Structures are given as C-alpha cells and as structure tokens.
C-alpha cells in the first residue's frame, strides 16, 4: 500500500470518528473503546486497535449506525494486517448494515484485489461508483485492477477521471506517469 493510500485510510478513520462524536448517541464506555481503537490504528498498533474495536462491537450499547462504523474500522484494520479474508467479512457486515455504503464496497474491492480476485474487485468498485460517482479513490483503485488485468486504456481513463474529481490525488498522477500517459494537468 502506498503512503498516499495509507494516509487516505487514516483520513477515513478520522471521518468516522467525527461521525461518532457529533452525530450519533453512544454510551461513554463504547465511545472510549472506539476512540482508543482509532488512536491505536493511527499509531500503527493494529492488534491493539482490533481489541478495542472488538470490545466496542460486542457492546450492547452500540446503535445500528455505530455497528456499521466499528465494522468498517475493523475491516480497515484487518486489511492493514494483511488478513484480507477477515477484512472481506467485516466489509460484508458493513454492507449488510448499509447496502449503499460506497466506502464499504471500495474497501471490500481492495481486499478482493489484494487476494487476486480482480473481477470481484471490479464489481465492488463499480457498485461504489454507482452510489457515489464522484468517489475519486474508487476510480484510482479500479484503475490499479484494470492495469493488473492488462487493460491500460481503461486504467488511464480511470486515473484521469480520478484526477478530474480530485486534482490533488497524487497517487492518480503517479499512476499516469507510470503508464506513460501523464499530460499537462
């Protein structure tokens, strides 16, 4: 995983933390476990993060929305640990709770891509884009899969689309450079 992708994942965790703090009611003990899990995740202490997320998830005080948030963070953590099968299971849980969770589809797509299930990854990236057509990271990740499948033209299209949505997405710019397709952007 590139540094840019890693920074993006940390940013996603922070966004979900804000949702927990300001938008959803939760008991203090569960909130503390979620916060400690996010803090451990951001510090690169993934095993510790998982323990906190597991404790929070098992709490009976978690709402439907909180279960979705904790499942998403667990999935990201399992992905970082290289446990892609467990990440897929956690992303499945997210998608059972919210069938339109575009980041859940993109995350599961990344996990499928990591285990070489490229066509399943493409399906999930397409679903993510169906629910959020301006999700630049889904175009970026889908481009990587197309590149792996040998479809450079489509990979370039996706990287260009990602950059048109987010001109600061350096990973897309780097991808275009690697494919020899970077024009004056």
Image (tube, rainbow, N blue to C red):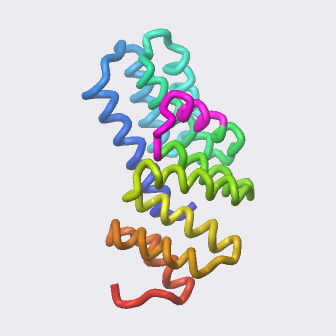
Judge whether residue 97 is colored magenta: yes
Q: Nearer the viewer, residue 15 or 117?
A: 117
Total labels: the figure holds: 0
Q: Is 18 left or right of 60, judged from the image as shown?
A: left
Residue at the location (54% across, 56% down)? 126
Mark yes or no: residue 54 visible. Answer: yes
x and y percentages locating residue 82 in the rendered image: 67, 48
Q: What residue do we see at 47% from left, 39% from top?
A: 100
- Which corner quadrant of the image does residue 64 belong to? top left
Q: Which span of residues is magenta-colored?
A: 89-102
The answer to whether 77 is drawn above or below residue 181 in the figure is: above
Main secondary structure type of the part rendered in magenta: helix
Between 57 and 106, which is closer to the camera in this rendering?
Answer: 106
Question: Which residue of the protein is positioned furthest toward the right in this rendering?
Answer: 116
Residue at (46, 46) in percent of width and height: 102
180 is higher (above) or lower (below) than 48: below
Quarter of the image containing the C terminus?
A: bottom left
The image quadrant that residue 45 belongs to is top right
Q: Position of residue 106 (x, y in %)?
A: 53, 50
The quarter of the picture where the N terminus appears is bottom right
Q: Say above or below: 61 vs 56.
A: above
Q: Position of residue 169 (x, y in %)?
A: 38, 68
Give whichever of 179, 160 is nearer the camera: 160
The spot of residue 138 in percent (x, y) is 49, 58
Q: Residue at x 65, y 77 (%)?
A: 151
């Amino acid at each position: 995983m590139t540094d840019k992708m890693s920074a993006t994942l940390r940013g996603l965790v922070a966004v979900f933390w804000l949702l927990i703090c300001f938008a959803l009611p939760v008991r203090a003990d569960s909130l503390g476990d979620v916060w400690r899990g996010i803090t451990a995740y951001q510090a690169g202490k993934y095993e510790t993060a998982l323990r906190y997320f597991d404790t929070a998830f098992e709490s009976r005080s978690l709402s439907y929305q909180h279960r979705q948030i904790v499942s998403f963070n667990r999935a990201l953590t399992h992905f970082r640990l290289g446990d892609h099968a467990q990440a897929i299971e956690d992303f499945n849980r997210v998608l059972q709770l919210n069938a339109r969770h575009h980041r859940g589809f993109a995350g599961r797509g990344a996990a499928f891509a990591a285990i070489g299930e490229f066509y399943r990854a493409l399906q999930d990236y397409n679903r993510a884009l169906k629910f959020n057509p301006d999700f630049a990271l889904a175009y970026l990740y889908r481009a990587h899969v197309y590149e792996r499948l040998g479809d450079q033209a489509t990979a370039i299209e996706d990287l260009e689309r990602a950059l048109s949505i987010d001109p600061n997405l350096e990973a897309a710019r780097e991808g275009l450079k690697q494919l020899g397709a970077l024009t004056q952007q």
